[in-house]
């Protein structure tokens, strides 16, 4: 398992997890945004997005994409959008699950 820019990649079936967080103390904001990319049993790629207030219940959206490159491009687009809006990439520690 290797991590690049807050992403965790595993060998075998495609799995990428990126977590972003945003803290704005003047506006009392504590938010997170998580992106997970996995491959389904049917060969398509599942891009899961989860967001909300840290410590609260969040929302979730799942998109299915036909190719790995399309899924990675969409993930990078969403990550860039969040970085532009003040989010920061947080290292994800999934070593205990590997």
Image: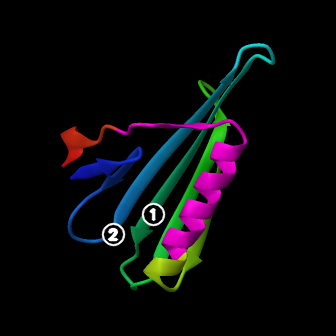
Q: Main secondary structure of the magenta part?
A: helix
Q: Residues within 10 Å of mark 1 (few under 14, many from 20)?
A: many
Front residue of this view, candidates 3 and 32? 3
| Residue span colored magenta | 71-92
Q: Is residue 8 above or below residue 14?
A: above
Q: Which residue is mark 1?
A: 37
Is residue 86 shown in magenta? Answer: yes
Q: Looking at the rendering, which quadrant does residue 62 occupy? A: bottom right
**Tag 1 secondary structure:** strand
| Mark linked to residue 14 | 2
Query: Do the residues bearing badges 2 and 1 touch, measured as CB atoms within 8 Å?
Result: yes
Whole-percent x, y for residue 68 in the image = 44, 79
Q: Residue at x 68, y 36 (%)?
A: 86
Q: Is residue 15 visible?
A: yes
| Left or right position of 4 against 25 | left
Q: Residues within 10 Å of mark 2 (few under 14, many from 20)?
A: some
């Amino acid at each position: 398992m290797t991590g690049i820019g807050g992403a965790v990649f595993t060998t075998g079936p495609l799995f990428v997890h990126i977590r972003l967080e945003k803290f704005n103390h003047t506006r009392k904001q504590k938010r997170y945004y998580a992106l997970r990319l996995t491959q389904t049993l049917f060969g398509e790629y599942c891009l899961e997005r989860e967001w909300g207030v840290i410590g609260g219940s969040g929302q979730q959206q799942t998109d299915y994409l036909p190719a790995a490159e399309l899924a990675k491009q969409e993930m990078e687009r969403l990550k860039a959008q969040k970085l532009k809006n003040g989010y920061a990439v947080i290292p994800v520690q999934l070593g205990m699950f590997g």
